Image: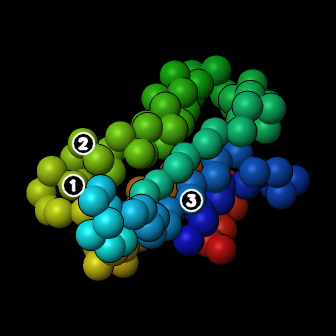
Amino acid sequence: MIFYLRNKKNETILDVDCYVKCEERFGGEGDYRYVELGAVVCIEPYSKFLLESPEDQRAEIIADFDNLQELRGWLWEKYFMKTKNTRDEYDNVIKALRPMIKGIADKYELCYVED
């Protein structure tokens, strides 16, 4: 699943791709499937969004989007510290990501899209 945050011009500010990755196990013991995530803050539309925002809100926007950019770290260093990373965790990861990303969309009146 891909999550997007977009501005009113439909320009993507954030792109988060969560998927099940398949790798061959060492020694030919079959495939290993696990949840992986990539998060990208798109520089040009993000920068315009930041510059058009009220000055007193900019530090908070920077902190929020820095946290979103680090979602892969959150996945591996926090989420999977409590449970094993297997393909069966995919739906649970999506359920955890959705309110985080939607919350930022609501906070800054951005468009929230799932694909």
**Could you classify mark 2 by the number of other residues whose Cα lies within 10 Å: few (under 14), some (14-19), or many (20 or more)?**
few
Which quadrant holds residue 73? top left
How far is disc 3 from disc 2 in space, using C-alphas? 18 Å
Q: Which residue is mark 3?
A: 17
How far is disc 2 from disc 1 in space, using C-alphas? 6 Å
Q: Which residue is mark 1?
A: 80
Q: Please tell me which residue is depicted at 52% across the width and 22% down the height of the picture.
A: 59
Q: Please tell me which residue is depicted at 41% across the width and 45% down the height of the picture.
A: 72
Q: Position of residue 56 (x, y in %)?
A: 57, 22
How far is disc 3 from disc 1 in space, using C-alphas? 17 Å
Q: Amino acid at mark 1?
A: Phe
**Could you classify mark 3 by the number of other residues whose Cα lies within 10 Å: few (under 14), some (14-19), or many (20 or more)?**
some
Q: Which residue is mark 2?
A: 77
Dividing the image into 4 quarters, which one contains the N terminus? Answer: bottom right
Disc nearer the start of the sequence (3/2)? 3
Residue 75 to residue 35: above or below: above
Q: Is residue 66 visible?
A: yes
